Image (cartoon, coloured by chain):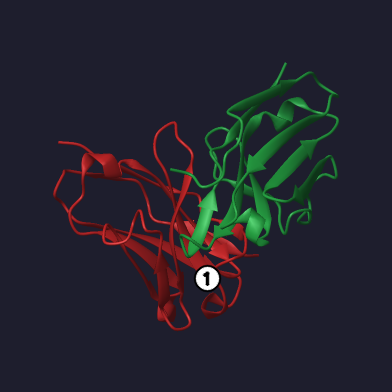
Amino acid sequence: QSVLTQPPSVSGAPGQRVTISCTGSSSNIGAGYDVHWYQQLPGTAPKLLIYGNSNRPSGVPDRFSGSKSGTSASLAITGLQAEDEADYYCQSYDSSLSGSGFGTGTKVTVL
Amino acid sequence: EVQLVQSGAEVKKPGESLKISCKGSGYSFTSYWIGWVRQMPGKGLEWMGIIYPGDSDTRYSPSFQGQVTISADKSISTAYLQWSSLKASDTAMYYCARQGGIQLWLSYWGQGTLVTVSS
């Protein structure tokens, strides 16, 4: 039972822009806690993609961007590429859990 | 280079005990939290809990409290996840990851340990 809700899937053609929403509540995103995003390629461990709502670790292309507003956050991928086909998860601290919670996950398909 | 190397895949029977490990290197092991994450077959990520090896302060997700034990041995830079009595529903991939703080992100991940519980 995830505390953060994401759409199960999104898709787009190469070069297009897609966005993934992450909807929380007053005990996590709405309480001001930061949102982080992970990319999980098939058969591999998750990789940090965005931290602190909108910051990219070294090596992450600037095609990936994050934002947060109210009780939600979003991950945008511009200039979609075949290699972006993966599962994406958001994460935030939740005061009702006294710990972290992950989103339900979104599968991105490149058409 | 920061690395987290996990122990190998395990096949166990229901009721058996198990302890898997996560060895950190390339950084000060006692200065960062280590989190554990479960991924059941075909499912999403679940945050299980976290430990600060510096003083063994440990927090659990309510879903996993009492089901598993998280520990660490700072002398050998290794964190552990253990079960006293496995169930078939514990079959999953388990990841450890370095977490800067309870409210922060998981910056470096281990390769994962696949645990299969079957009679």
Q: Residues within 10 Å of mark 1 (few under 14, many from 20)?
A: many
Q: Nearer the viewer, residue A24 or A105?
A: A24
The answer for which chain carries disc 1 is B
Q: Which residue type does callout 1 highlight? A: Trp
Q: Which quarter of the picture shows residue B2? A: bottom right
Image side of residue A44 versus residue A35, left or right:
left
The N terminus of chain B, quarter of image: bottom right
Chain identifier for the green-coloured part of the image: A
B79 sits to left or right of A41: left
Q: Residue at x 39, y 55 (%)?
A: B7
- The image position of residue B75, as x and y in percent, is 42, 81
| Side (left or right) of A22 relative to B115 | right
Q: Is residue B47 above or below residue B56?
A: above
Please identify which colour was used for chain B in the image: red
Task: Work out which residue is located at the far bottom of the displayed protein and give it.
Answer: B55
Query: The C terminus of chain B lies in which quarter of the figure?
Result: top left
> Whole-percent x and y of residue A11?
70, 22
At a point 16% along the width and 43% down the height, the residue shown is: B13
The image position of residue B14, as x and y in percent, is: 16, 44
Q: Residue at x 55, y 40 (%)?
A: A44
Tag 1 residue: B33
Kind of element beneath mark 1:
strand
Residue under the image location 58 percent in, 78 percent down: B28
